[in-house]
Image (cartoon, helix red, strand yellow):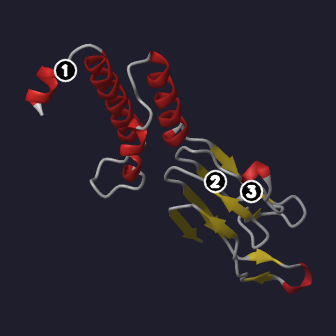
Amino acid sequence: LLAIMKGASGTDIDVLNNKISVALDWHDAAKDAGATAPDSEGLDGAGAALDGVDESQGSVEAAMARTDAFWGEQTTFRLTSGEDRGVDFVGTGGADLFDASLTQNPTAGGVSNTLSSGDVLNGVGGTDTLDATLVPEFMGGLGIMPLDVQPTTSNIENIEIEAR
């Protein structure tokens, strides 16, 4: 590898330097997203980060934009006590958090779940997390009843549930 690098000249050295820059950018973004173990989610896309990188600065900028879109900043999606679905609950290419914390229930007093069977959540890319706290719900004259909570989820790799 060192002999090949030492033998690079002309545009070859530019391509090599650009690929090193893109690879380091990918490494830093993966590390910032918590993908540090060899079997971490998303690392299989590392080679694709170099696709199309040539001697031009534009190819480097395009590759780094793809890396940013893949890992991205964490976006938090806060669920409501209603039905959460549609474009407002479709993640990004980054490591998104779907926050299903409890919420105040003004009708019944006390708290209500924000994760429900009517929710449709899609993490899209990155390593996404659904973090939910669940309690039995108050059901009118029936009192407190345990409820099955069965949201539809896709592309959410980590699910953390606290049942109270």
Residue appearing at x 61%, y 54% in the figure:
124
Residue 99, label in figure: 2
Q: What type is the residue that disc 1 sits on?
A: Ala
Circle 1 or circle 2, nearest the eye: 1
Residue appearing at x 74%, y 69% in the figure:
116
On screen, 40 above or below 29?
A: below
Circle 3 or circle 2, nearest the eye: 2
* Disc nearer the start of the sequence (1/2): 1
Circle 1 or circle 3, nearest the eye: 1
Q: What type is the residue that disc 2 sits on?
A: Asp
Residue 8, label in figure: 1
On screen, 53 above or below 44?
A: above
Residue appearing at x 12%, y 34% in the figure:
1
| Quarter of image, res 117 | bottom right
Q: Nearer the viewer, residue 89 or 15?
A: 15
Query: Residue 17, how many percent across, how many down?
Result: 29, 21
Q: Residue furthest front?
A: 10
Tags 1 and 2 touching, CB below 8 Å? no
Determine the secondary structure under disc 2.
strand
Q: Which residue is mark 3?
A: 103
